[in-house]
Amino acid sequence: MGGDAIWFVDVLAGVRGELESLCHGFGVASVCSAVLEGFAEALPSWFSGRKRRVIASVILYTSLLIARGVRKGLLKDVLEALGVSKPSFRDAFSRVAFVDWDTGLVYLEPRLFEALSKRVRLPGHVRRYSVGEVVRNRVEKVYPGLYSSLDLVCMKSCGKSYLKTLLEEPEVARDAVLKLSTPGVARWIVEKAVATIAELLDIDAEPSKVAQLLFEDPEAFKTAMRGLIEKASSG
C-alpha cells in the first residue's frame, strides 16, 4: 500500500472516530456513514490539507441536511459540537455543496450526488448541482411552470436550454421570455438569472443593469455575461 493510500485510510479512520458518537447523538448515524463513504469514493482529493474536525463538520452537516432538510440552527449546532470555525467550514463545504435558502433545496457536487445515490435514498430536496438548476428552481418557486416553458421554447428554437440560450443567443432568450410573460416578469426573470449566476460564482454584479442590456442591446448583454463568468474564472 502506497504512502498516499495509507494517509487516506488514516484520515478516514480519524474522521470516522470524530463522527461516531456525534452522529449517534444527532440521530443520523447511518446517514453519516453513507455520506463519509460517498465523499471518500467521489472526492478523495477534497480531504487533502483539511483538518479532520473540519472534514467531520462537513460530513455531519451534509448528513443532517439530507435527513432533516434545510433548517436554521443546524450549522450552529454542528460547529459548536466540533469546535470548528465558520470560515474554515464554509471554505470546505462550498466546494462540495450549496444550500439555497430561497427554495429550501440542497445541491451536491455531481460526483458526490451520484456516489450518495448508490448508498442512501436521497430525498427530493437534495439535487445534483448545476447553475441552471439553481436558476430554474428559484424562478419556478415564484412562477411555477414558467421556466420549464421557456426551456421548451428555446429547445424548439435552437436546441438549447433557456439558460444556455440566454448566454449564447440572448436575442432568442429575450423573445422567448417576452412571448410567455409580461415585460415586467421578463425583466425579473433575467435579473434573477443574473443575480443567481453572480452569487454562485461569488462575484459582484448589478443584475438590473445587466438585465436591461438584454432588452436594449443583446450583444452587449452577451459580452457582459461572458465578462462576469471570465472574471470569476480568473479570480
Image: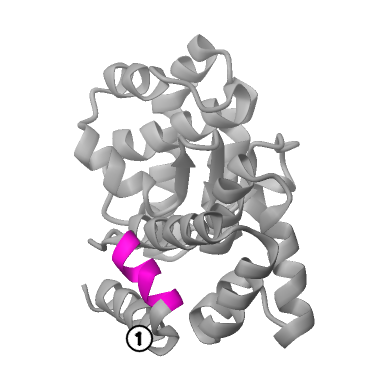
Q: Quadrant of residue 159?
A: bottom right
Residue displayed at 70% across by 38% down? 122
Residue displayed at 72% across by 42% down? 119
Vertical relation: 55 (above or below) 19: below
Residue 168: x and y in percent read 52, 85
Q: Would residue 53 appear left or right of 97 to someone viewing this image?
A: left
> Is 210 colored magenta in this rendering?
yes
Identify which residue, 66 or 170, lies in the foreground. Answer: 170
Vertical relation: 31 (above or below) 80: below
Residue displayed at 48% across by 21% down? 71
Q: How is the image coloured?
A: one colour
* Quadrant of the image containing the C terminus: bottom left
> Is 30 colored magenta in this rendering?
no
Badge 1 local density, few (<14 within 10 Å), some, or many (20+)?
A: some
Residue 80: x and y in percent read 27, 17
Vertical relation: 158 (above or below) 212: below
Identify which residue, 230 or 7, lies in the foreground. Answer: 230
Identify which residue, 167 or 7, lies in the foreground. Answer: 167
Instruction: State the extent of the magenta-drawn residues as a range.
Output: 208-215
Under tag 1, what secondary structure? Answer: helix
* Image label count: 1
Q: Is residue 14 visible?
A: no
Q: Would residue 225 appear left or right of 60 to someone viewing this image?
A: left
Q: Is residue 202 visible?
A: yes
Q: Residue at label 1?
A: 220
Q: Amino acid at mark 1?
A: Ala
Residue displayed at 53% across by 30% down? 65
Residue 16: x and y in percent read 46, 32
Q: From the image, give the main secondary structure of the stretch colored magenta.
A: helix
